[in-house]
Protein backbone atom coordinates (compact mmCIF):
# COMPACT_ATOMS: atom_id res chain seq x y z
CA UNK A 1 0.00 0.00 0.00
CA UNK A 2 1.24 3.52 -0.79
CA UNK A 3 2.03 5.62 2.25
CA UNK A 4 -0.20 8.67 2.59
CA UNK A 5 1.77 11.86 3.22
CA UNK A 6 -0.24 13.85 5.71
CA UNK A 7 -0.56 17.51 6.60
CA UNK A 8 1.06 18.94 9.71
CA UNK A 9 -1.42 20.95 11.76
CA UNK A 10 -1.05 22.14 15.37
CA UNK A 11 1.90 19.84 16.00
CA UNK A 12 0.21 16.69 14.60
CA UNK A 13 0.46 14.79 11.32
CA UNK A 14 -3.14 14.85 10.12
CA UNK A 15 -4.87 13.03 7.24
CA UNK A 16 -6.82 15.20 4.80
CA UNK A 17 -10.40 14.82 3.64
CA UNK A 18 -9.19 13.86 0.17
CA UNK A 19 -6.06 12.43 -1.46
CA UNK A 20 -4.05 13.76 -4.41
CA UNK A 21 -1.77 11.64 -6.58
CA UNK A 22 1.59 13.17 -7.47
CA UNK A 23 2.45 12.20 -11.09
CA UNK A 24 5.91 12.18 -12.69
CA UNK A 25 5.79 14.37 -15.85
CA UNK A 26 8.66 12.34 -17.38
CA UNK A 27 6.68 9.09 -17.00
CA UNK A 28 2.95 9.43 -16.57
CA UNK A 29 2.66 5.84 -15.30
CA UNK A 30 4.88 6.70 -12.31
CA UNK A 31 2.99 7.85 -9.19
CA UNK A 32 5.51 9.69 -7.00
CA UNK A 33 3.25 9.45 -3.96
CA UNK A 34 -0.12 10.14 -2.39
CA UNK A 35 -0.67 13.37 -0.51
CA UNK A 36 -3.43 14.53 1.79
CA UNK A 37 -5.66 17.37 0.68
CA UNK A 38 -6.98 19.58 3.44
CA UNK A 39 -10.45 21.09 3.52
CA UNK A 40 -11.45 24.48 4.82
CA UNK A 41 -11.88 23.28 8.42
CA UNK A 42 -8.34 21.95 8.46
CA UNK A 43 -7.02 25.22 7.03
CA UNK A 44 -8.90 26.98 9.85
CA UNK A 45 -7.34 24.64 12.41
CA UNK A 46 -3.85 25.40 11.09
CA UNK A 47 -4.48 29.15 11.22
CA UNK A 48 -5.82 28.85 14.78
CA UNK A 49 -2.77 26.84 15.84
CA UNK A 50 -0.41 29.38 14.32
CA UNK A 51 -2.26 32.21 16.07
CA UNK A 52 -2.09 30.41 19.42
CA UNK A 53 1.62 29.70 19.04
CA UNK A 54 2.53 33.25 18.06
CA UNK A 55 2.82 35.03 21.45
CA UNK A 56 5.42 32.60 22.80
CA UNK A 57 7.25 32.14 19.48
CA UNK A 58 7.48 35.90 18.88
CA UNK A 59 9.39 36.20 22.16
CA UNK A 60 11.55 33.08 21.67
CA UNK A 61 15.32 33.22 22.05
CA UNK A 62 17.10 34.12 18.85
CA UNK A 63 19.71 31.46 19.66
CA UNK A 64 16.99 28.78 19.54
CA UNK A 65 15.69 30.08 16.22
CA UNK A 66 19.22 30.23 14.81
CA UNK A 67 19.93 26.66 15.92
CA UNK A 68 16.70 25.26 14.48
CA UNK A 69 17.06 27.03 11.12
CA UNK A 70 20.66 25.88 10.87
CA UNK A 71 19.59 22.31 11.69
CA UNK A 72 17.02 22.45 8.89
CA UNK A 73 19.64 23.78 6.47
CA UNK A 74 22.14 21.05 7.37
CA UNK A 75 19.50 18.32 7.07
CA UNK A 76 18.49 19.55 3.60
CA UNK A 77 22.12 19.72 2.45
CA UNK A 78 22.89 16.25 3.82
CA UNK A 79 20.01 14.82 1.74
CA UNK A 80 20.41 16.99 -1.38
CA UNK A 81 20.91 14.09 -3.81
CA UNK A 82 17.87 12.16 -2.57
CA UNK A 83 15.65 15.26 -2.35
CA UNK A 84 16.94 16.52 -5.70
CA UNK A 85 15.86 13.23 -7.26
CA UNK A 86 12.41 13.54 -5.69
CA UNK A 87 12.12 17.12 -6.94
CA UNK A 88 13.15 16.25 -10.50
CA UNK A 89 10.83 13.26 -10.47
CA UNK A 90 7.78 15.29 -9.52
CA UNK A 91 8.55 18.57 -11.35
CA UNK A 92 10.55 17.51 -14.40
CA UNK A 93 13.65 19.69 -14.19
CA UNK A 94 16.88 17.75 -14.80
CA UNK A 95 18.59 15.97 -11.92
CA UNK A 96 21.51 18.45 -11.70
CA UNK A 97 18.95 21.28 -11.63
CA UNK A 98 16.91 19.47 -8.97
CA UNK A 99 19.94 18.83 -6.77
CA UNK A 100 21.09 22.42 -7.26
CA UNK A 101 17.71 23.73 -6.16
CA UNK A 102 17.72 21.59 -3.03
CA UNK A 103 21.22 22.78 -2.13
CA UNK A 104 20.02 26.34 -2.50
CA UNK A 105 17.13 25.67 -0.14
CA UNK A 106 19.60 24.33 2.44
CA UNK A 107 21.81 27.38 2.07
CA UNK A 108 18.81 29.68 2.48
CA UNK A 109 17.91 28.09 5.83
CA UNK A 110 21.51 28.37 7.02
CA UNK A 111 21.65 32.01 5.90
CA UNK A 112 18.53 32.84 7.93
CA UNK A 113 19.95 30.89 10.86
CA UNK A 114 22.63 33.57 10.88
CA UNK A 115 20.17 36.39 10.24
CA UNK A 116 18.26 35.51 13.41
CA UNK A 117 21.33 36.73 15.34
CA UNK A 118 21.82 39.85 13.25
CA UNK A 119 18.49 41.62 13.62
CA UNK A 120 19.45 45.06 14.88
CA UNK A 121 17.57 48.26 15.60
CA UNK A 122 18.57 51.89 15.67
CA UNK A 123 18.85 54.49 18.37
CA UNK A 124 18.42 58.06 17.18
CA UNK A 125 18.62 61.37 19.05
CA UNK A 126 15.20 62.93 19.49
CA UNK A 127 14.55 66.52 18.48
CA UNK A 128 13.41 66.91 22.10
CA UNK A 129 16.41 67.09 24.46
CA UNK A 130 16.64 64.17 26.89
CA UNK A 131 14.33 61.91 24.90
CA UNK A 132 15.61 58.64 23.37
CA UNK A 133 14.15 57.27 20.16
CA UNK A 134 14.55 53.54 19.47
CA UNK A 135 13.57 51.87 16.22
CA UNK A 136 13.13 48.11 16.43
CA UNK A 137 11.63 45.37 14.33
CA UNK A 138 9.06 42.85 15.51
CA UNK A 139 7.49 39.83 13.83
CA UNK A 140 4.24 40.47 11.94
CA UNK A 141 2.32 37.48 13.30
CA UNK A 142 0.84 34.62 11.28
CA UNK A 143 2.14 34.42 7.72
CA UNK A 144 0.30 32.51 5.00
CA UNK A 145 2.73 31.15 2.42
CA UNK A 146 1.41 30.11 -1.00
CA UNK A 147 3.89 28.72 -3.52
CA UNK A 148 3.97 27.60 -7.18
CA UNK A 149 5.16 24.36 -8.76
CA UNK A 150 8.26 25.51 -10.64
CA UNK A 151 10.64 25.73 -7.66
CA UNK A 152 9.09 23.15 -5.32
CA UNK A 153 11.65 23.56 -2.50
CA UNK A 154 13.60 26.81 -3.08
CA UNK A 155 10.58 29.14 -3.11
CA UNK A 156 9.03 27.57 0.02
CA UNK A 157 12.48 27.85 1.66
CA UNK A 158 12.96 31.50 0.83
CA UNK A 159 9.60 32.37 2.36
CA UNK A 160 9.45 29.95 5.33
CA UNK A 161 13.03 30.53 6.54
CA UNK A 162 12.76 34.33 6.95
CA UNK A 163 9.24 34.03 8.36
CA UNK A 164 10.46 31.74 11.17
CA UNK A 165 13.76 33.60 11.58
CA UNK A 166 12.02 36.83 12.56
CA UNK A 167 9.56 35.16 14.94
CA UNK A 168 6.47 34.65 12.80
CA UNK A 169 4.26 31.56 12.69
CA UNK A 170 3.66 29.90 9.34
CA UNK A 171 0.78 28.27 7.48
CA UNK A 172 2.33 26.84 4.31
CA UNK A 173 0.28 25.81 1.27
CA UNK A 174 2.41 24.33 -1.54
CA UNK A 175 1.29 23.93 -5.18
CA UNK A 176 -0.92 20.93 -5.87
CA UNK A 177 1.41 19.60 -8.61
CA UNK A 178 4.50 19.24 -6.40
CA UNK A 179 3.59 18.25 -2.83
CA UNK A 180 6.54 15.82 -2.54
CA UNK A 181 9.34 18.34 -2.04
CA UNK A 182 7.09 20.47 0.18
CA UNK A 183 6.24 17.49 2.37
CA UNK A 184 9.92 16.46 2.64
CA UNK A 185 10.81 20.03 3.64
CA UNK A 186 8.01 20.09 6.21
CA UNK A 187 9.22 16.77 7.66
CA UNK A 188 12.71 18.22 8.10
CA UNK A 189 11.32 21.40 9.69
CA UNK A 190 9.15 19.36 12.08
CA UNK A 191 12.13 17.24 13.15
CA UNK A 192 14.13 20.38 13.95
CA UNK A 193 11.86 20.92 16.95
CA UNK A 194 9.83 24.07 16.38
CA UNK A 195 7.05 24.31 19.02
CA UNK A 196 3.60 23.03 18.01
CA UNK A 197 1.68 25.52 15.85
CA UNK A 198 4.73 27.54 14.78
CA UNK A 199 4.91 25.72 11.46
CA UNK A 200 1.90 24.15 9.72
CA UNK A 201 1.76 22.35 6.38
CA UNK A 202 -1.64 22.46 4.68
CA UNK A 203 -1.56 20.78 1.28
CA UNK A 204 -4.66 21.24 -0.81
CA UNK A 205 -6.38 23.31 -3.44
CA UNK A 206 -5.75 27.00 -3.92
CA UNK A 207 -9.49 27.58 -4.16
CA UNK A 208 -10.01 25.95 -0.74
CA UNK A 209 -6.92 26.26 1.45
CA UNK A 210 -5.51 29.34 -0.30
CA UNK A 211 -8.84 31.16 -0.19
CA UNK A 212 -9.25 30.32 3.50
CA UNK A 213 -5.89 31.92 4.28
CA UNK A 214 -6.63 35.03 2.22
CA UNK A 215 -10.00 35.60 3.86
CA UNK A 216 -8.98 34.94 7.48
CA UNK A 217 -8.28 37.97 9.67
CA UNK A 218 -6.03 35.87 11.88
CA UNK A 219 -3.53 35.69 8.98
CA UNK A 220 -1.56 38.93 9.20
CA UNK A 221 0.43 38.59 6.00
CA UNK A 222 0.42 36.58 2.77
CA UNK A 223 3.52 35.84 0.74
CA UNK A 224 2.58 34.47 -2.68
CA UNK A 225 4.46 33.36 -5.77
CA UNK A 226 2.46 32.22 -8.79
CA UNK A 227 0.51 33.46 -11.77
CA UNK A 228 -0.47 37.06 -12.45
CA UNK A 229 -4.20 36.35 -12.41
CA UNK A 230 -4.15 34.51 -9.07
CA UNK A 231 -1.77 37.03 -7.51
CA UNK A 232 -3.84 40.04 -8.49
CA UNK A 233 -7.11 38.50 -7.29
CA UNK A 234 -5.48 37.41 -4.04
CA UNK A 235 -3.99 40.84 -3.38
CA UNK A 236 -7.30 42.61 -3.96
CA UNK A 237 -8.99 40.46 -1.31
CA UNK A 238 -6.14 40.43 1.20
CA UNK A 239 -5.43 44.17 0.99
CA UNK A 240 -9.15 44.87 1.41
CA UNK A 241 -8.86 43.43 4.91
CA UNK A 242 -5.54 45.27 5.44
CA UNK A 243 -3.28 42.22 5.35
CA UNK A 244 0.35 42.72 4.40
CA UNK A 245 0.91 41.21 0.94
CA UNK A 246 3.98 40.21 -1.03
CA UNK A 247 3.57 38.92 -4.58
CA UNK A 248 6.05 37.47 -7.06
CA UNK A 249 4.38 36.78 -10.37
CA UNK A 250 5.31 36.56 -13.99
CA UNK A 251 7.97 37.92 -16.24
CA UNK A 252 8.51 38.57 -19.92
CA UNK A 253 12.20 39.02 -19.47
CA UNK A 254 14.32 40.54 -22.23
CA UNK A 255 17.81 39.44 -23.16
CA UNK A 256 19.40 42.15 -25.31
CA UNK A 257 22.20 41.01 -27.63
CA UNK A 258 24.25 43.86 -29.13
CA UNK A 259 26.44 43.79 -32.24
CA UNK A 260 29.58 43.92 -30.09
CA UNK A 261 28.57 40.88 -27.99
CA UNK A 262 30.82 37.85 -27.67
CA UNK A 263 28.75 35.38 -29.74
CA UNK A 264 29.36 32.24 -27.61
CA UNK A 265 28.41 34.23 -24.47
CA UNK A 266 25.23 35.45 -26.16
CA UNK A 267 24.26 31.92 -27.21
CA UNK A 268 25.04 30.50 -23.75
CA UNK A 269 22.95 33.19 -22.07
CA UNK A 270 20.04 32.62 -24.45
CA UNK A 271 20.08 28.81 -24.19
CA UNK A 272 20.40 28.82 -20.42
CA UNK A 273 18.02 31.74 -19.80
CA UNK A 274 15.30 30.78 -22.23
CA UNK A 275 15.31 26.99 -22.17
CA UNK A 276 16.95 25.49 -19.08
CA UNK A 277 14.48 24.21 -16.48
CA UNK A 278 12.26 23.78 -19.58
CA UNK A 279 11.76 27.56 -19.63
CA UNK A 280 9.55 27.23 -16.57
CA UNK A 281 11.15 30.05 -14.57
CA UNK A 282 9.68 33.46 -13.93
CA UNK A 283 13.12 34.85 -14.77
CA UNK A 284 13.32 33.03 -18.14
CA UNK A 285 14.47 35.09 -21.15
CA UNK A 286 11.43 34.87 -23.38
CA UNK A 287 12.28 37.90 -25.54
CA UNK A 288 15.64 37.82 -27.30
CA UNK A 289 16.17 41.38 -28.57
CA UNK A 290 18.99 41.33 -31.09
CA UNK A 291 20.61 44.17 -33.04
CA UNK A 292 20.86 43.92 -36.83
CA UNK A 293 24.62 43.40 -37.17
CA UNK A 294 24.70 40.16 -35.15
CA UNK A 295 21.11 38.97 -35.71
CA UNK A 296 21.66 36.34 -38.43
CA UNK A 297 24.88 34.96 -36.90
CA UNK A 298 23.18 34.75 -33.50
CA UNK A 299 20.17 32.83 -34.83
CA UNK A 300 22.37 30.41 -36.78
CA UNK A 301 24.56 29.71 -33.74
CA UNK A 302 21.56 29.43 -31.42
CA UNK A 303 19.83 27.00 -33.78
CA UNK A 304 22.96 24.82 -33.82
CA UNK A 305 23.02 24.70 -30.03
CA UNK A 306 19.31 23.97 -29.75
CA UNK A 307 19.68 21.05 -32.16
CA UNK A 308 22.19 19.48 -29.76
CA UNK A 309 19.99 19.75 -26.64
CA UNK A 310 18.69 16.40 -25.42
CA UNK A 311 15.04 16.52 -24.35
CA UNK A 312 14.09 13.55 -22.20
CA UNK A 313 13.46 11.96 -18.83
CA UNK A 314 14.46 14.43 -16.12
CA UNK A 315 16.24 11.69 -14.18
CA UNK A 316 18.24 10.29 -17.11
CA UNK A 317 21.95 11.10 -17.36
CA UNK A 318 22.69 13.53 -20.18
CA UNK A 319 19.21 15.08 -20.36
CA UNK A 320 19.45 18.83 -21.01
CA UNK A 321 15.73 19.63 -20.92
CA UNK A 322 13.15 17.71 -18.95
CA UNK A 323 9.45 17.57 -19.80
CA UNK A 324 6.85 20.29 -19.44
CA UNK A 325 5.20 19.97 -16.03
CA UNK A 326 1.70 18.84 -17.09
CA UNK A 327 -0.73 18.63 -19.98
CA UNK A 328 -2.39 22.00 -19.41
CA UNK A 329 1.02 23.76 -19.40
CA UNK A 330 1.97 21.86 -22.58
CA UNK A 331 -1.27 22.99 -24.21
CA UNK A 332 -0.51 26.60 -23.20
CA UNK A 333 3.00 26.38 -24.71
CA UNK A 334 1.64 24.98 -28.00
CA UNK A 335 -1.16 27.55 -28.07
CA UNK A 336 1.32 30.41 -27.79
CA UNK A 337 3.57 28.94 -30.49
CA UNK A 338 0.48 28.92 -32.74
CA UNK A 339 -0.50 32.44 -31.71
CA UNK A 340 3.02 33.70 -32.49
CA UNK A 341 2.93 32.11 -35.95
CA UNK A 342 -0.52 33.49 -36.71
CA UNK A 343 0.70 36.93 -35.68
CA UNK A 344 3.48 36.67 -38.27
CA UNK A 345 6.48 35.14 -36.49
CA UNK A 346 8.31 32.15 -37.99
CA UNK A 347 8.79 28.95 -36.04
CA UNK A 348 12.50 28.67 -36.90
CA UNK A 349 13.24 25.80 -34.54
CA UNK A 350 11.49 23.14 -32.45
CA UNK A 351 8.06 23.47 -30.90
CA UNK A 352 7.28 19.81 -31.59
CA UNK A 353 5.69 17.38 -29.16
CA UNK A 354 8.19 14.54 -28.80
CA UNK A 355 7.61 10.81 -28.26
CA UNK A 356 9.88 9.16 -25.74
CA UNK A 357 10.02 5.52 -24.50
CA UNK A 358 7.98 6.57 -21.46
CA UNK A 359 4.92 8.73 -22.00
CA UNK A 360 5.49 12.29 -20.75
CA UNK A 361 4.94 15.93 -21.71
CA UNK A 362 7.95 16.38 -23.99
CA UNK A 363 8.37 19.48 -26.14
CA UNK A 364 11.40 20.50 -28.22
CA UNK A 365 12.72 24.02 -27.46
CA UNK A 366 10.86 26.46 -29.70
CA UNK A 367 12.37 29.55 -31.31
CA UNK A 368 10.10 32.12 -32.96
CA UNK A 369 11.98 34.54 -35.22
CA UNK A 370 10.79 37.67 -36.99
CA UNK A 371 8.71 38.51 -33.94
CA UNK A 372 7.65 42.01 -32.98
CA UNK A 373 7.19 43.28 -29.47
CA UNK A 374 3.51 43.94 -30.13
CA UNK A 375 2.65 40.26 -30.62
CA UNK A 376 0.78 38.50 -27.81
CA UNK A 377 3.54 35.90 -27.81
CA UNK A 378 5.95 38.74 -26.93
CA UNK A 379 3.72 40.34 -24.30
CA UNK A 380 2.16 37.49 -22.30
CA UNK A 381 4.05 35.03 -20.14
CA UNK A 382 4.17 31.57 -21.76
CA UNK A 383 6.14 29.71 -19.05
CA UNK A 384 7.63 27.07 -21.31
CA UNK A 385 10.61 26.37 -23.58
CA UNK A 386 9.55 29.05 -26.06
CA UNK A 387 11.48 32.23 -26.95
CA UNK A 388 10.92 34.96 -29.53
CA UNK A 389 13.65 36.82 -31.38
CA UNK A 390 12.91 40.50 -31.96
CA UNK A 391 15.25 42.26 -34.40
CA UNK A 392 16.15 45.90 -33.63
CA UNK A 393 18.42 48.52 -35.21
CA UNK A 394 20.70 49.50 -32.34
CA UNK A 395 21.02 49.87 -28.57
CA UNK A 396 18.48 52.66 -28.08
CA UNK A 397 15.75 50.68 -29.80
CA UNK A 398 16.78 47.53 -27.92
CA UNK A 399 16.43 49.34 -24.60
CA UNK A 400 13.04 50.79 -25.55
CA UNK A 401 11.74 47.35 -26.59
CA UNK A 402 13.19 45.72 -23.46
CA UNK A 403 11.28 48.19 -21.27
CA UNK A 404 8.07 48.07 -23.32
CA UNK A 405 6.37 45.36 -21.26
CA UNK A 406 3.87 45.05 -18.42
CA UNK A 407 6.48 43.07 -16.49
CA UNK A 408 9.82 43.98 -14.89
CA UNK A 409 11.45 41.05 -13.13
CA UNK A 410 14.80 40.40 -14.77
CA UNK A 411 16.57 41.92 -17.79
CA UNK A 412 19.84 40.93 -19.43
CA UNK A 413 22.30 42.41 -21.89
CA UNK A 414 25.19 40.77 -23.71
CA UNK A 415 27.77 43.33 -24.76
CA UNK A 416 31.47 44.14 -24.53
CA UNK A 417 30.67 47.87 -24.28
CA UNK A 418 31.06 49.27 -20.79
CA UNK A 419 29.08 52.32 -21.88
CA UNK A 420 26.04 50.30 -22.97
CA UNK A 421 26.24 47.89 -20.03
CA UNK A 422 26.38 50.77 -17.56
CA UNK A 423 23.53 52.61 -19.26
CA UNK A 424 21.39 49.47 -19.38
CA UNK A 425 21.90 48.81 -15.64
CA UNK A 426 20.57 52.27 -14.91
CA UNK A 427 17.83 52.56 -17.55
CA UNK A 428 16.30 49.08 -17.48
CA UNK A 429 12.95 49.02 -15.69
CA UNK A 430 13.48 45.61 -14.09
CA UNK A 431 14.25 44.51 -10.55
CA UNK A 432 17.29 42.42 -11.49
CA UNK A 433 19.83 43.20 -14.22
CA UNK A 434 22.25 40.69 -15.73
CA UNK A 435 25.26 41.76 -17.78
CA UNK A 436 26.77 38.93 -19.86
CA UNK A 437 24.82 36.46 -17.71
CA UNK A 438 21.51 34.63 -18.22
CA UNK A 439 18.40 36.42 -16.93
CA UNK A 440 17.64 33.39 -14.76
CA UNK A 441 19.85 32.02 -11.99
CA UNK A 442 20.21 34.24 -8.95
CA UNK A 443 22.18 34.12 -5.71
CA UNK A 444 20.35 33.11 -2.53
CA UNK A 445 21.63 35.85 -0.23
CA UNK A 446 20.70 39.00 -2.16
CA UNK A 447 17.33 40.62 -2.91
CA UNK A 448 15.02 38.99 -5.44
CA UNK A 449 12.06 40.74 -7.01
CA UNK A 450 10.75 42.88 -9.80
CA UNK A 451 8.87 45.99 -10.84
CA UNK A 452 5.62 46.75 -12.65
CA UNK A 453 3.34 43.71 -13.02
CA UNK A 454 5.96 41.22 -11.84
CA UNK A 455 6.04 41.94 -8.13
CA UNK A 456 4.22 43.73 -5.34
CA UNK A 457 5.54 44.52 -1.91
CA UNK A 458 9.05 44.32 -0.50
CA UNK A 459 11.84 42.17 -1.95
CA UNK A 460 12.43 38.56 -0.99
CA UNK A 461 15.71 36.89 0.05
CA UNK A 462 18.82 38.11 1.80
CA UNK A 463 18.66 40.60 4.62
CA UNK A 464 16.08 42.56 2.59
CA UNK A 465 13.52 39.85 3.44
CA UNK A 466 13.08 41.50 6.83
CA UNK A 467 11.12 44.35 5.23
CA UNK A 468 8.22 42.01 4.64
CA UNK A 469 8.59 39.64 7.57
CA UNK A 470 8.92 42.29 10.29
CA UNK A 471 7.07 45.39 11.33
CA UNK A 472 8.87 48.51 12.57
CA UNK A 473 8.28 50.00 16.00
CA UNK A 474 9.41 53.47 17.10
CA UNK A 475 9.69 53.87 20.89
CA UNK A 476 10.25 57.23 22.69
CA UNK A 477 11.63 57.30 26.21
CA UNK A 478 12.15 60.16 28.66
CA UNK A 479 14.43 58.52 31.21
P1 LIG B 1 1.01 28.28 -11.14
O1 LIG B 1 0.02 27.31 -11.70
O2 LIG B 1 1.88 28.93 -12.15
O3 LIG B 1 1.76 27.72 -9.98
P2 LIG B 1 -1.11 29.66 -9.72
O4 LIG B 1 -1.21 31.11 -9.48
O5 LIG B 1 -2.24 28.95 -10.32
O6 LIG B 1 0.19 29.53 -10.60
O7 LIG B 1 -0.75 28.90 -8.39
C1 LIG B 1 0.18 29.38 -7.45
C2 LIG B 1 -0.28 28.99 -6.06
O8 LIG B 1 -1.49 29.69 -5.79
C3 LIG B 1 -0.60 27.50 -5.92
O9 LIG B 1 -0.20 27.07 -4.63
C4 LIG B 1 -2.11 27.49 -6.04
O10 LIG B 1 -2.70 26.41 -5.38
C5 LIG B 1 -2.48 28.78 -5.36
N1 LIG B 1 -3.80 29.27 -5.73
C6 LIG B 1 -4.48 29.05 -6.87
N2 LIG B 1 -5.69 29.64 -6.83
C7 LIG B 1 -5.78 30.26 -5.64
C8 LIG B 1 -6.78 31.05 -5.00
N3 LIG B 1 -7.93 31.33 -5.60
N4 LIG B 1 -6.51 31.53 -3.78
C9 LIG B 1 -5.34 31.28 -3.18
N5 LIG B 1 -4.36 30.54 -3.71
C10 LIG B 1 -4.57 30.03 -4.94
Image: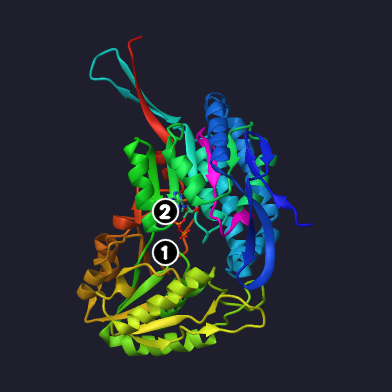
Percent from the top left, x then y, of residue 68? 63, 38
Could you tell whether 112 is left or right of 470 in the image? right
Q: Is residue 1 above or below residue 258?
A: above
Which tag is nearer the camera, tag 2 or tag 1?
1
- Please name whichever residue, 84 or 7, is drawn nearer the observer in this view of the structure: 7
Residue drawn at x 24%, y 71% as measured from the top left? 401
Q: Is residue 288 above or below residue 146?
A: below
Residue drawn at x 31%, y 61% as measured from the top left? 407
| Callout 1: CB less than 8 Å from ligand 1 | no
Provide the residue designation for mark 2: 448
Provide the residue designation for mark 1: 283
Task: Please report whichever mark, 2 or 1, sits nearer to the chain's N-terminal start.
Answer: 1
| Callout 2: CB less than 8 Å from ligand 1 | no
Q: Secondary structure at mark 1?
A: loop
- Please name whichever residue, 251 or 337, is drawn nearer the observer in this view of the structure: 337
Tell me which corner region of the image, top left, top right, bottom left or bottom right, holds residue 38: top right
Marks 2 and 1, how far apart in space?
10 Å
> Is 168 one of the magenta-colored residues?
yes
Could you tell whether 186 is left or right of 299 in the image? right
Q: In what quadrant of the picture does the N terminus appear?
A: bottom right
Percent from the top left, x then y, of residue 256? 32, 74
- Report the residue that reaches farthest toward the front: 17
Q: Secondary structure at mark 2?
A: loop
Q: Which residues are magenta?
A: 165-181
Q: Is residue 138 above or below residue 232?
A: above
- Report the residue that reaches farthest toward the right: 1
Amino acid sequence: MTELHRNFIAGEWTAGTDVAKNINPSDLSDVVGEYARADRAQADAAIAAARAAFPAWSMSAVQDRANMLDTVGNAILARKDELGRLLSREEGKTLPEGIGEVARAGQIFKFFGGEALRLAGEKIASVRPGVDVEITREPIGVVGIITPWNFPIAIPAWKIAPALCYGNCVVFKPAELVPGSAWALADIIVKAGFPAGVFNLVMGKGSVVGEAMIADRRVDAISFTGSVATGRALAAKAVARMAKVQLEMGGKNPLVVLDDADLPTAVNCAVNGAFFSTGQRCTASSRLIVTAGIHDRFIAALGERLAKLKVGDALATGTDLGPVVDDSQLKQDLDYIGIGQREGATLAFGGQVLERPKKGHYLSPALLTGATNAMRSSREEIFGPVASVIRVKEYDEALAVANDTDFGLSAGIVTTSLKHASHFKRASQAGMIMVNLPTAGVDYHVPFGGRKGSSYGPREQGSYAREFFTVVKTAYTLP
